[in-house]
Image: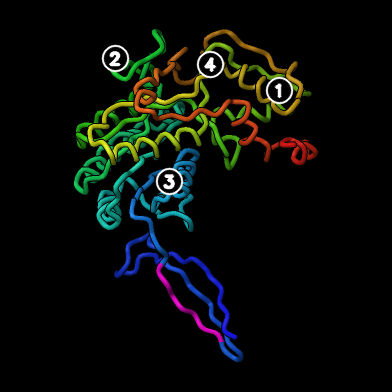
């Protein structure tokens, strides 16, 4: 009797196949011998390229499109291999070759230096990634007719007059916001048909707690034997990356039906919280004490300036029938349970 097993295989960079095409190796066996046969996997017709696919948002975007019958290829840099393509987005030739070879219908550009204090300390490197690379990707997208979605931030606003509509005048308070605003301009200059999607503070299924400015607070929440000062001044709207990924997919699919969909869009969670309130919500989600958390209502004096309330008006996407919102308590529980120090909760948290 002849039998067989399967193993998906990435073709790599063979001259006869683009990076990211997949084939399937079948292991066939019969008495006394076995051999490999290679079959092509049935690849979906719709193609999407995700930059920053190793990051918190990029991973969610990749999963969302792949789960909805898109042929998804992700690229990253330091954490790319083996799952994603390793591409330096500052290498113009490498970006050109990737996009020309893959011919994506959609590109979601998640890659960025998103940490305001790092942007302040490394302004040239941040500008290269957030502005120059974004403009070049937009140019390459336009050449192949791809719909580019550039992920931007609520930090393009100064936070003095919320909520903000897409056409409200930006006025970033820190260099991070300025580089993302310049990135928006570079994208829309190089690709008339591109979209900008502004989002606020993000959280989700992190690889480490420090990957999100929301989840990084969890250790302070758990270690209740030590008091912790938490910001209670800046008003935030924590947004689940799975929801942003769904919005990206809905926007891309709507665009394939209607070419007039382009320009600037906003998406955000709708629960207004300070970091102190987020920390209390985390404690509540896992039945942990919160009396050691201390709200600090003064404006922060250390680090890059932050807007006090940059709430985004999301009505433009909602009028298109696009949107998804997961309650913070549910999203944060899904994101943080693997990091619980009390192992008993690992077994009981979802029961």
Q: Quadrant of residue 131?
A: top left
x and y, in percent, of residue 260 in the image: 23, 32
- Please report the residue visible at 48 percent of the width from the left and 44 percent of the height from the top: 59
CB-based contact (under 8 Å), mark 1 and mark 2: no
Is residue 189 placed above or below 284 in the rendered structure?
below
Is 337 on the left or on the right of 251, as rendered?
A: right
SS for tag 2?
A: loop
Per the rendered image, the range of residues in magenta is 34-40
**Marks 4 and 1, how far apart in space?**
17 Å
Where is mark 2, residue-wise? 169
- Of residues 279 and 105, the one nearer the viewer is 105
| Circle 1 Cα neighbour tier, 10 Å, few/some/many (<14 / 14–19 / ≥20) | few
Q: Which mark is residue 318?
A: none
CB-based contact (under 8 Å), mark 2 and mark 3: no
| Circle 4 Cα neighbour tier, 10 Å, few/some/many (<14 / 14–19 / ≥20) | some
CB-based contact (under 8 Å), mark 4 and mark 1: no
Work out whether mark 4 precedes mark 1 in sequence or the reverse, and give the earlier one. Answer: 4
| Circle 2 Cα neighbour tier, 10 Å, few/some/many (<14 / 14–19 / ≥20) | few
Q: Which mark is residue 284?
A: 1
Is residue 296 placed above or below 50 in the rendered structure?
above
CB-based contact (under 8 Å), mark 3 and mark 1: no
- The chief SS type of the magenta part is strand
SS for tag 3?
A: helix
Is 16 on the left or on the right of 112, as rendered?
A: left
Is residue 149 placed above or below 10 in the rendered structure?
above
**Marks 1 and 2, how far apart in space?**
38 Å
Depth check, mark 2 against mark 3: the one in front is 3
Q: Is residue 204 magenta?
A: no
Residue 92 appears in the figure:
yes
Work out whether mark 3 precedes mark 1 in sequence or the reverse, and give the earlier one. Answer: 3
Where is mark 3, residue-wise? 65
Where is mark 4, residue-wise? 272
């Amino acid at each position: 009797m002849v039998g067989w097993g399967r193993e998906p295989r990435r073709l790599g960079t063979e001259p006869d196949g683009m990076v990211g095409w997949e084939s399937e190796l079948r292991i066939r066996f019969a008495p006394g011998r076995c051999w490999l046969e290679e079959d092509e996997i049935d690849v979906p017709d719709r193609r999407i390229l995700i930059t920053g696919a190793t990051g918190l948002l990029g991973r969610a975007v990749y999963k969302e499109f792949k789960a909805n019958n898109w042929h998804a290829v992700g690229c990253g840099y330091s954490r790319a291999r083996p799952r994603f393509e390793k591409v330096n987005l500052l290498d113009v030739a490498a970006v050109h070759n990737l996009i020309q070879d893959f011919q994506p219908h959609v590109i979601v550009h998640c890659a960025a230096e998103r940490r305001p204090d790092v942007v302040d300390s490394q302004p040239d490197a941040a500008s290269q990634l957030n502005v120059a690379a974004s403009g070049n990707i937009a140019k390459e997208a336009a050449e192949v007719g791809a719909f580019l979605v550039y992920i931007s931030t609520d930090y393009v606003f100064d936070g003095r007059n919320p909520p903000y509509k897409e056409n409200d005048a930006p006025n970033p308070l820190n260099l991070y916001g300025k580089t993302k605003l310049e990135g928006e301009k570079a994208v829309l200059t190089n690709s008339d048909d591109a979209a900008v999607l502004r989002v606020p503070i993000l959280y989700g299924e992190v690889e480490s707690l420090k990957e999100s400015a929301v989840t990084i607070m969890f250790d302070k929440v758990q270690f209740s034997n030590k008091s912790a000062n938490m910001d209670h001044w800046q008003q935030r709207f924590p947004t689940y990356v799975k929801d942003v990924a769904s919005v990206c997919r809905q926007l891309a699919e709507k665009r394939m039906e209607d070419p007039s969909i382009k320009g600037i869009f906003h998406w955000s969670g709708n629960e207004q919280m300070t970091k102190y309130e987020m920390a209390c919500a985390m404690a509540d989600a896992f039945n942990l004490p919160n009396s050691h958390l201390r709200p600090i209502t003064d404006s922060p004096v250390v680090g890059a300036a932050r807007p006090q309330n940059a709430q985004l008006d999301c009505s433009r996407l909602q009028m298109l029938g696009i949107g998804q919102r997961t309650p913070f308590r549910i999203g944060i529980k899904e994101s943080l349970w693997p990091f619980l120090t009390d192992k008993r909760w690992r077994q009981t948290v979802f029961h």
